[in-house]
Image (spheres, rainbow, N blue to C red):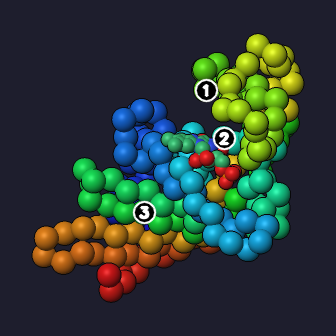
Amino acid sequence: MKNALYELINNELSRAVVEKEHAWKVFTFANTNQNNEPVARSVILRSYEFNQVSFFTDFRSDKIEALKNNHTVSLCFYSNLLKLQLQIKAKAIIYHKDNLCKEQWDSTYWTSLLCYHMQRKPSTVLDEPFLLNAENMSKDEAYKNFAVIVCKSIEWDVLELKEKGNQRSKFTFDMGGSFNKAQFLAP
Ligand SMILES: Cc1cc2nc3c(=O)[nH]c(=O)nc-3n(C[C@H](O)[C@H](O)[C@H](O)COP(=O)(O)O)c2cc1C
């Protein structure tokens, strides 16, 4: 199915993966925690293909256990340049110590992987401000802390800000993750 707005978003997400300054390089990832409370935080877009968005995270972080219980997540991107907000409802899939992780780990610049050398698990209460001693952990040990979260699109809600009235569209995806249908919504 062809749709100009869908093609534009595909193009922008693909560009955001490789362009550091792209407004969509950092996006908001929201899910529910173990207490069923909403949690939203910024993450870095690492890949986009076949309507799937991915980011890296620490496998020891609380969001991993929460995602095992509830894999339905919400992503939000906004570009002031494009005047475009993209909200994605998605199913999150956790990758850890597998081929996809290895491929991403090996192809990522080492400075972006230093944070996985942290001894303590994320959210641990500390007696003093955190100081990274990356050299205290081997690369192989750090790799065990590295996870890739792939978010498979279920629905997109797109808001285009326009002077003569905002336009909102909904895109749905089939079970296989392929673009299925586009509809206009009242903004
Ligand atoms: C610009 C920016 C980019 C970030 N990128 C990531 C990321 O790619 N992955 C990640 O897990 N956390 C990233 N963080 C940190 C998260 O926002 C969050 O603090 C961390 O994941 C802990 O969240 P949690 O306790 O809900 O797991 C980033 C923070 C900022 C400010």
Residue tagged 3: 86
Instruction: Check the image and name the residue furthest to the top.
Output: 135
Above or below — where is 90 with respect to 165?
A: above
Determine whether, in the image, residue 59 is placed left or right of residue 2: right
Mark 1 is surrounded, within 10 Å at the Cα level, by few (under 14), some (14 to 19) or many (20 or more) other residues, namely few
Give coordinates of residue 106: x percent, y percent. Answer: 71, 22
Mark 2 vs ligand 1: CB below 8 Å: yes
Determine whether, in the image, residue 136 is placed left or right of residue 172: right
Residue tagged 1: 112
Give coordinates of residue 113: x percent, y percent. Answer: 67, 26
| Badge 3 amino acid | Leu
Of labels 1 and 2, earlier in sequence is 2
Q: Are marks 1 and 2 in contact (CB under 8 Å)?
A: yes
Above or below — where is 120 with respect to 141?
A: below
Q: Are marks 1 and 3 in contact (CB under 8 Å)?
A: no
Q: Secondary structure at mark 2?
A: strand
Residue 103 is at least partly visible in this image: no
Residue tagged 2: 56
Residue 33 is at least partly visible in this image: yes
| Badge 1 amino acid | Ser
Q: Nearer the viewer, residue 139 or 39?
A: 39
Q: CA distance from mark 1 to mark 2?
A: 10 Å
Determine whether, in the image, residue 88 is placed left or right of residue 168: right
